[in-house]
Image (cartoon, rainbow, N blue to C red):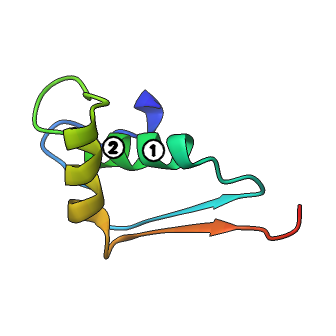
Amino acid sequence: MELFRPPPGFRTSAAIATTYCADLIACVALLTTLDGGDGETVEYTRIAALRALERLRENVRIVAHANR
């Protein structure tokens, strides 16, 4: 997941993810990583996930292929 994290000092302004199988936990982990947090490491907590959802809700789309 660290490959998806923006470099220090940067924020995710837009992202699109595609998948055949959208696992909720994986999607939330991806959003938390894309948000980058406020420190040097990403915390995968409920608060961090909610903060990522709030910050990225207008900037990220996840497209899942139906019936696969």
Q: Are marks 2 and 1 in contact (CB under 8 Å)?
A: yes
Q: Residue at x 10, y 37 (%)?
A: 38
Q: Between 27 and 1, which is closer to the camera in this rendering?
A: 27
Number of the label disc, if any, that sits on residue 32: 2
Where is residue 68 shown, x and y percent of the image? Answer: 89, 61
Query: Residue 63: which quarter of the image?
Result: bottom right
32 displayed left or right of 65: left
Q: Which residue is mark 1?
A: 30
Q: Residue at x 88, y 68 (%)?
A: 67
Furthest residue toward front: 46
In the image, is 13 to the left or to the right of 68? left
Q: Secondary structure at mark 1?
A: helix
Q: Position of residue 18 (x, y in %)?
A: 65, 61
Q: Amino acid at mark 1?
A: Leu
- Visible residue check, residue 13: no
Does residue 1 appear to the left or right of 36 in the view shown?
right
Please tell me whether residue 62 is drawn above or below residue 6 in the rendered image.
below
- Specify whether 25 is left or right of 43: right
Is label 2 in a helix, a strand or a loop?
helix
Indicate the position of residue 19 as horizontal and vertical percent values.
70, 57
Q: Give how far apart the Cα atoms at labels 2 and 1 are.
A: 5 Å
Residue 34 seen in this snapshot? yes
User: What amino acid type should be assigned to the residue bearing mark 2?
Assistant: Thr
Q: Residue at x 47, y 31 (%)?
A: 1
Q: Point out residue 27 in the picture as x, y percentages from the top left corner.
A: 51, 49
Q: Is residue 50 above or below residue 60?
A: above
Q: Residues within 10 Å of mark 1 (few under 14, many from 20)?
A: many
* Residue 64: assigned label: none
The residue positioned farthest toward the top in the image shown: 41
